[in-house]
Amino acid sequence: MTEERQRAIWAIYVWCRRTDELVDGPNAVYMSSSVLDRWEETLQDIFDGRPYDMLDAALSNTVSKFPLDIMPFRDMIEGMRMDTRKCRYETFQELYLYCYYVAGTVGLMTVPVMGIAPESLVPTQTIYNAALYLGIGNQLTNILRDVGEDALRGRVYLPQDELSQFGLCNEDVFSLKVSDRSREFVKHQITRARFYFNFAEEGASQLDKASRWLVWSSLLLYSKILDAIEDNDYDNLTKRAHVGRANKLLMLHLAYTRSLSTQGFILN
Protein backbone atom coordinates (compact mmCIF):
# COMPACT_ATOMS: atom_id res chain seq x y z
CA MET A 1 0.00 0.00 0.00
CA THR A 2 1.07 3.58 -0.50
CA GLU A 3 2.31 5.44 2.57
CA GLU A 4 -0.76 7.65 2.47
CA ARG A 5 -3.05 4.61 2.58
CA GLN A 6 -0.96 3.01 5.31
CA ARG A 7 -1.31 6.11 7.49
CA ALA A 8 -5.05 6.25 6.80
CA ILE A 9 -5.61 2.61 7.77
CA TRP A 10 -3.51 3.19 10.91
CA ALA A 11 -5.63 6.23 11.84
CA ILE A 12 -8.86 4.24 11.43
CA TYR A 13 -7.45 1.33 13.42
CA VAL A 14 -6.35 3.61 16.26
CA TRP A 15 -9.80 5.20 16.46
CA CYS A 16 -11.44 1.75 16.53
CA ARG A 17 -9.04 0.55 19.23
CA ARG A 18 -9.66 3.63 21.37
CA THR A 19 -13.40 3.17 20.95
CA ASP A 20 -13.22 -0.49 21.96
CA GLU A 21 -11.12 0.26 25.02
CA LEU A 22 -13.75 2.64 26.34
CA VAL A 23 -15.71 -0.54 27.10
CA ASP A 24 -13.03 -3.23 27.45
CA GLY A 25 -9.92 -1.23 28.40
CA PRO A 26 -8.34 -0.54 31.82
CA ASN A 27 -10.66 2.42 32.47
CA ALA A 28 -13.85 0.59 31.47
CA VAL A 29 -14.99 0.73 35.10
CA TYR A 30 -15.74 4.42 34.51
CA MET A 31 -17.85 3.74 31.44
CA SER A 32 -21.23 5.42 31.20
CA SER A 33 -23.64 6.49 28.47
CA SER A 34 -22.40 10.06 28.83
CA VAL A 35 -18.84 8.94 28.03
CA LEU A 36 -20.01 7.44 24.74
CA ASP A 37 -22.13 10.50 24.03
CA ARG A 38 -19.04 12.70 24.41
CA TRP A 39 -17.04 10.29 22.24
CA GLU A 40 -19.65 10.61 19.50
CA GLU A 41 -19.50 14.41 19.75
CA THR A 42 -15.72 14.18 19.40
CA LEU A 43 -16.19 12.00 16.31
CA GLN A 44 -18.34 14.69 14.72
CA ASP A 45 -15.63 17.25 15.50
CA ILE A 46 -13.07 15.02 13.79
CA PHE A 47 -15.18 14.86 10.63
CA ASP A 48 -15.71 18.63 10.84
CA GLY A 49 -11.94 19.22 10.95
CA ARG A 50 -11.77 20.07 14.68
CA PRO A 51 -9.63 17.28 16.20
CA TYR A 52 -9.11 17.23 19.96
CA ASP A 53 -5.66 15.58 20.06
CA MET A 54 -2.96 14.23 17.74
CA LEU A 55 -4.64 10.84 17.31
CA ASP A 56 -7.89 12.54 16.37
CA ALA A 57 -5.89 14.72 13.98
CA ALA A 58 -4.63 11.60 12.18
CA LEU A 59 -8.21 10.51 11.49
CA SER A 60 -9.28 14.05 10.60
CA ASN A 61 -6.49 14.13 8.03
CA THR A 62 -7.70 10.78 6.66
CA VAL A 63 -11.25 12.13 6.35
CA SER A 64 -9.93 15.08 4.36
CA LYS A 65 -8.17 12.78 1.88
CA PHE A 66 -10.57 9.85 1.47
CA PRO A 67 -14.38 9.74 1.04
CA LEU A 68 -15.14 8.24 4.45
CA ASP A 69 -18.74 8.10 5.65
CA ILE A 70 -19.28 8.96 9.33
CA MET A 71 -22.13 6.45 9.72
CA PRO A 72 -20.03 3.28 10.25
CA PHE A 73 -18.05 5.14 12.94
CA ARG A 74 -21.27 6.14 14.69
CA ASP A 75 -22.54 2.59 14.38
CA MET A 76 -19.41 1.24 16.06
CA ILE A 77 -20.07 3.55 19.01
CA GLU A 78 -23.61 2.15 19.10
CA GLY A 79 -22.05 -1.30 19.31
CA MET A 80 -20.15 -0.19 22.41
CA ARG A 81 -23.44 1.02 23.91
CA MET A 82 -24.92 -2.40 23.17
CA ASP A 83 -21.97 -4.11 24.86
CA THR A 84 -22.53 -2.18 28.08
CA ARG A 85 -26.17 -3.21 28.45
CA LYS A 86 -26.47 -6.57 26.71
CA CYS A 87 -24.63 -9.86 27.11
CA ARG A 88 -27.32 -12.22 25.78
CA TYR A 89 -28.62 -12.52 22.22
CA GLU A 90 -31.92 -14.30 21.72
CA THR A 91 -31.53 -14.90 17.98
CA PHE A 92 -28.85 -14.79 15.32
CA GLN A 93 -30.51 -11.66 13.92
CA GLU A 94 -29.69 -9.89 17.21
CA LEU A 95 -26.15 -11.26 17.20
CA TYR A 96 -25.69 -10.26 13.56
CA LEU A 97 -26.55 -6.66 14.43
CA TYR A 98 -23.95 -6.68 17.19
CA CYS A 99 -21.36 -8.15 14.81
CA TYR A 100 -22.16 -5.44 12.30
CA TYR A 101 -21.74 -2.69 14.87
CA VAL A 102 -18.39 -3.85 16.25
CA ALA A 103 -16.76 -5.43 13.19
CA GLY A 104 -18.74 -5.13 9.97
CA THR A 105 -18.39 -1.37 10.29
CA VAL A 106 -14.62 -1.69 9.96
CA GLY A 107 -14.99 -3.07 6.46
CA LEU A 108 -17.19 -0.14 5.47
CA MET A 109 -14.71 2.31 7.00
CA THR A 110 -11.72 0.95 5.14
CA VAL A 111 -12.96 0.28 1.59
CA PRO A 112 -12.62 3.97 0.59
CA VAL A 113 -8.98 3.81 1.69
CA MET A 114 -8.23 0.40 0.18
CA GLY A 115 -9.61 1.50 -3.17
CA ILE A 116 -11.33 -0.56 -5.85
CA ALA A 117 -9.38 -1.99 -8.79
CA PRO A 118 -9.89 0.18 -11.90
CA GLU A 119 -10.45 -2.96 -13.97
CA SER A 120 -13.14 -4.33 -11.63
CA LEU A 121 -16.50 -5.02 -13.27
CA VAL A 122 -18.22 -5.88 -9.97
CA PRO A 123 -20.78 -3.35 -8.68
CA THR A 124 -19.38 -1.11 -5.95
CA GLN A 125 -22.17 -2.11 -3.55
CA THR A 126 -21.17 -5.75 -3.92
CA ILE A 127 -17.63 -4.89 -2.85
CA TYR A 128 -18.86 -2.94 0.17
CA ASN A 129 -21.15 -5.85 1.08
CA ALA A 130 -18.20 -8.22 0.86
CA ALA A 131 -16.18 -5.98 3.20
CA LEU A 132 -19.10 -6.00 5.62
CA TYR A 133 -19.31 -9.80 5.43
CA LEU A 134 -15.60 -10.13 6.16
CA GLY A 135 -16.14 -8.18 9.36
CA ILE A 136 -19.12 -10.36 10.26
CA GLY A 137 -17.13 -13.53 9.59
CA ASN A 138 -14.19 -12.29 11.63
CA GLN A 139 -16.39 -11.37 14.59
CA LEU A 140 -18.26 -14.68 14.50
CA THR A 141 -14.87 -16.39 14.51
CA ASN A 142 -13.73 -14.28 17.48
CA ILE A 143 -16.90 -15.27 19.34
CA LEU A 144 -16.39 -18.98 18.64
CA ARG A 145 -12.74 -18.83 19.67
CA ASP A 146 -13.51 -17.00 22.93
CA VAL A 147 -16.62 -18.83 24.20
CA GLY A 148 -14.81 -20.27 27.22
CA GLU A 149 -13.12 -16.98 28.12
CA ASP A 150 -16.36 -15.03 27.73
CA ALA A 151 -18.18 -17.55 29.94
CA LEU A 152 -15.70 -16.84 32.75
CA ARG A 153 -16.75 -13.18 32.47
CA GLY A 154 -20.43 -14.07 32.60
CA ARG A 155 -20.97 -13.39 28.91
CA VAL A 156 -22.55 -15.60 26.25
CA TYR A 157 -22.34 -14.23 22.70
CA LEU A 158 -24.31 -17.12 21.22
CA PRO A 159 -27.87 -17.21 19.84
CA GLN A 160 -30.04 -18.44 22.70
CA ASP A 161 -32.64 -20.03 20.43
CA GLU A 162 -29.98 -22.02 18.58
CA LEU A 163 -28.48 -23.24 21.85
CA SER A 164 -31.95 -24.55 22.71
CA GLN A 165 -32.27 -26.25 19.33
CA PHE A 166 -29.18 -28.30 20.19
CA GLY A 167 -30.45 -29.08 23.69
CA LEU A 168 -28.10 -26.59 25.35
CA CYS A 169 -28.49 -23.60 27.65
CA ASN A 170 -26.28 -20.97 29.26
CA GLU A 171 -25.50 -23.24 32.20
CA ASP A 172 -23.94 -25.73 29.80
CA VAL A 173 -21.68 -22.95 28.57
CA PHE A 174 -20.79 -21.74 32.08
CA SER A 175 -20.00 -25.30 33.19
CA LEU A 176 -17.32 -25.49 30.46
CA LYS A 177 -18.22 -29.12 29.81
CA VAL A 178 -17.79 -30.33 26.24
CA SER A 179 -20.44 -32.73 24.96
CA ASP A 180 -21.61 -34.21 21.68
CA ARG A 181 -24.38 -31.59 21.63
CA SER A 182 -21.94 -28.72 22.14
CA ARG A 183 -19.73 -30.09 19.36
CA GLU A 184 -22.66 -30.22 16.94
CA PHE A 185 -23.61 -26.68 17.91
CA VAL A 186 -20.07 -25.44 17.22
CA LYS A 187 -20.04 -27.22 13.85
CA HIS A 188 -23.19 -25.34 12.91
CA GLN A 189 -21.68 -22.00 13.92
CA ILE A 190 -18.46 -22.69 12.00
CA THR A 191 -20.49 -23.42 8.84
CA ARG A 192 -22.17 -20.03 9.21
CA ALA A 193 -18.89 -18.16 9.70
CA ARG A 194 -17.48 -19.78 6.55
CA PHE A 195 -20.61 -18.74 4.69
CA TYR A 196 -19.72 -15.10 5.34
CA PHE A 197 -16.06 -15.62 4.46
CA ASN A 198 -17.08 -17.12 1.13
CA PHE A 199 -19.15 -14.04 0.37
CA ALA A 200 -16.25 -11.81 1.40
CA GLU A 201 -13.71 -13.33 -0.95
CA GLU A 202 -15.21 -11.80 -4.09
CA GLY A 203 -14.78 -8.31 -2.68
CA ALA A 204 -11.21 -9.04 -1.60
CA SER A 205 -10.37 -9.88 -5.20
CA GLN A 206 -11.84 -6.61 -6.50
CA LEU A 207 -9.88 -4.19 -4.33
CA ASP A 208 -6.98 -2.13 -5.60
CA LYS A 209 -4.05 -4.44 -6.25
CA ALA A 210 -1.90 -2.85 -3.54
CA SER A 211 -4.57 -3.51 -0.90
CA ARG A 212 -5.60 -7.07 -1.69
CA TRP A 213 -2.83 -8.83 0.23
CA LEU A 214 -3.89 -7.24 3.50
CA VAL A 215 -7.52 -8.29 3.11
CA TRP A 216 -6.78 -11.77 1.81
CA SER A 217 -4.46 -12.25 4.80
CA SER A 218 -7.31 -11.42 7.17
CA LEU A 219 -9.64 -13.79 5.33
CA LEU A 220 -7.27 -16.73 5.35
CA LEU A 221 -5.84 -16.25 8.84
CA TYR A 222 -9.27 -16.01 10.43
CA SER A 223 -10.39 -19.04 8.45
CA LYS A 224 -7.50 -20.96 10.00
CA ILE A 225 -8.88 -20.16 13.46
CA LEU A 226 -12.00 -22.08 12.46
CA ASP A 227 -9.77 -24.94 11.31
CA ALA A 228 -8.03 -24.83 14.69
CA ILE A 229 -11.35 -25.16 16.52
CA GLU A 230 -12.07 -28.24 14.42
CA ASP A 231 -8.60 -29.59 15.23
CA ASN A 232 -9.47 -29.16 18.92
CA ASP A 233 -12.42 -31.52 18.35
CA TYR A 234 -14.82 -28.56 18.52
CA ASP A 235 -13.83 -27.81 22.11
CA ASN A 236 -13.99 -24.02 22.42
CA LEU A 237 -14.90 -24.16 26.11
CA THR A 238 -11.63 -25.38 27.63
CA LYS A 239 -9.27 -24.80 24.68
CA ARG A 240 -8.47 -21.59 22.82
CA ALA A 241 -7.95 -22.13 19.11
CA HIS A 242 -4.47 -21.07 18.09
CA VAL A 243 -2.85 -20.66 14.68
CA GLY A 244 0.87 -21.41 14.84
CA ARG A 245 3.58 -19.27 13.33
CA ALA A 246 4.29 -21.71 10.50
CA ASN A 247 0.62 -21.76 9.50
CA LYS A 248 0.47 -17.97 9.61
CA LEU A 249 3.47 -17.67 7.30
CA LEU A 250 1.95 -20.21 4.93
CA MET A 251 -1.32 -18.27 4.86
CA LEU A 252 0.52 -15.00 4.17
CA HIS A 253 2.18 -16.62 1.18
CA LEU A 254 -1.15 -18.00 -0.06
CA ALA A 255 -2.82 -14.62 0.52
CA TYR A 256 -0.15 -12.93 -1.58
CA THR A 257 -0.69 -15.41 -4.41
CA ARG A 258 -4.44 -14.80 -4.39
CA SER A 259 -3.96 -11.04 -4.21
CA LEU A 260 -2.37 -11.09 -7.65
CA SER A 261 -5.70 -11.93 -9.31
CA THR A 262 -9.10 -10.26 -9.52
CA GLN A 263 -10.69 -13.70 -9.83
CA GLY A 264 -12.47 -14.99 -6.72
CA PHE A 265 -11.61 -18.15 -4.80
CA ILE A 266 -14.16 -20.01 -2.71
CA LEU A 267 -12.71 -21.00 0.66
CA ASN A 268 -13.15 -24.56 1.86
Image: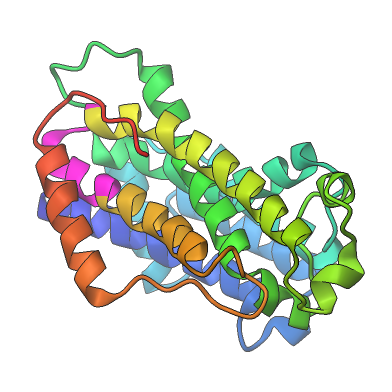
Quarter of the picture holding the C terminus: top left
Magenta-drawn stretch, dominant element (helix, strand or loop): helix
165 lies left or right of 63: right
Residue nearest the viewer, comparing 268 with 26:
268
Examine the rendering and report whether any part of residue 69 can be seen: no
Residue in the picture at 10% in, 43% down: 257
Residue nearest the viewer, comparing 93 with 18:
93
Query: How many marks on residues?
Result: 0
Give the vertical position of 67 relative to 168 (above or below): above
Query: Can you give x and y, in whole percent of width and height, for residue 195 in the image?
Result: 51, 34
Query: Can you give x and y, in whole percent of width and height, for residue 45 in the image?
Result: 53, 54
Q: What stretch is highlighted in magenta?
A: 206-216
Residue in the picture at 50% in, 60% down: 230
Q: Is residue 212 magenta?
A: yes
Colouring: rainbow
Examine the rendering and report whether any part of residue 121 can be seen: yes
8 lies left or right of 55: left
Residue nearest the viewer, comparing 165 with 199:
165
Query: Can you give x and y, in whole percent of width and height, for residue 64 in the image?
Result: 32, 43
34 lies left or right of 58: right
230 lies left or right of 54: right
Residue in the picture at 12% in, 30% down: 261
Residue in the picture at 76% in, 41% down: 92
Q: Does the magenta stretch include residue 80?
A: no
Q: In which quarter of the view is residue 249 placed? A: bottom left
Query: Can you give x and y, in whole percent of width and height, for residue 124 in the image?
Result: 36, 18
Q: In which quarter of the view is residue 43 placed? A: bottom right
Give the vertical position of 49 relative to 86 (above or below): above
Give the vertical position of 173 relative to 119 (above or below): below
